[in-house]
Amino acid sequence: MEGSAAETIARFGAARADPALAVLEGFHAIKHALRFGGDVELVATSAPDELAALADELAPDVAARLSAAAVALDPAAYARLGPRAHHTRVAAVARRPPFDPAAVLAARRDAPAVLLDDPRHLGNLGAVVRVAAGADAACVATVGESDPWDPVAIRGSAGLHFALPVGRLAERPVGPEGVPTGGRPLIALDPDGDELDPAALPSDALLAFGSERHGLGEGVLATADARLRIPMRPGVSSLNLATSVAAVLFAWRLAAGPGAAQS
C-alpha cells in the first residue's frame, strides 16, 4: 500500500478515537460542514470524478474547497476508513467546534434550545440535530453516555452539527450543583403535562426531551418550570424523538411568525 493511503487510513482511525475530531461519512455531511464553516482537515474518496460532478450539481458553493481537500484512494483502501462505506464514496475528518455549555445556553435568547435526556439511538439523535438546524434553534445539548458527535449521529444530521452548537453536558442542567440553564426556563415535554400552546412557548425556553422508552429523568421533571405535552390522537403512545422535537420547534416557529429567529 502506498504511504499516502496508509497515512490517510491511520488518520481516520485516530480521528474516531479523538474527542476533538469528528468523522463525516457521505457527501451531504461534508457539504454542510464546509458550508457552515467547519474545519475540515481531510477528505478521502474512491470516486473523485463522481464527487466533483456531485459537488458541481448540488453544492457549487463548496465545490472548489471540496476538490482541493480531496485525496483519492483505491476502493480497497477506502473501505478501510471505517465500518460504514457511504454510497457517495467520500468521507472526511473535521475538527469539532468548541462547546462551552454555560456560554451556549446563555446565548441566542431569541430561539429555544434543545436538551436530549439520555438519548440512545444515534441516528435519531442526528435527526434531532437536523431538525433543530432547520428550525434555527439555539443549540442541541445532550446528557448521558451517547456521544452526540458519533459518526452515526453526524450521518443522521447530514453534517448539520456544524450549523448550530452541539455538545454534551456533564450533568443535567438542574439543581444547585447542575450545569446552569443560562437563565432559560426549563420546559419538560411530558405525556402527563399540559397541552402545548405554541404561542405561549417562551422563545428562550430550554426544551427537554426524553427517550421514547424511558422518557425524561425524574430530576428534570421535578425541577422543570413547566411540563407540556404534544396533542395526539388517543391510543398513540408516543412519537419518534426527532418527530417530537420537530413538532415543538416548528409549532413555535410558525406561532412566532416572520420575526422568529434567523441566525
Image (spheres, rainbow, N blue to C red):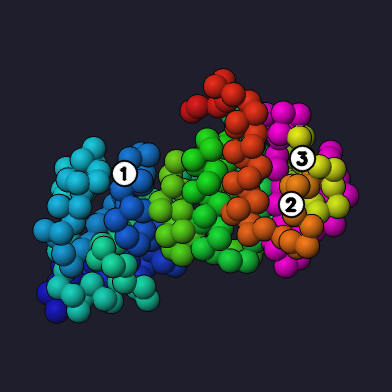
The disc placed on residue 34 is: 1
For residue 205, say whether it is visible: yes
- Please tell me whether mark 2 sits on a helix, a strand or a loop: loop
On residue 196, the disc is 3
- The residue where tag 2 is placed is 232
Between residue 177 and residue 225, name the one nearer to us: 225
**View extreme (top): residue:** 259
Q: Secondary structure at mark 3?
A: loop
Q: Is residue 224 magenta?
A: yes
Give the number of the mark in front: 3 or 2: 2
**Above or below 111: residue 131:** below
Name the N-terminal-most of marks 3 and 2.
Answer: 3
Decide if residue 149 is on the left or right side of residue 57.
Answer: right
Span colored in magenta: 198-226
Q: Residue at x 64, y 37 (%)?
A: 251
Question: Which of disc 1 and disc 3 is earlier in sequence?
Answer: 1
Question: Residue type at mark 3?
Answer: Leu
Marks 3 and 1 sit apart, C-alpha to C-alpha, by 37 Å
Q: Outermost residue toward the right?
A: 222
Residue occupying image coordinates x 31% and y 71%: 85
Query: What separation in Å lies between label 2 and label 1 (alpha carbons)?
Result: 39 Å
The three-letter amino acid code for the residue at tag 2 is: Met
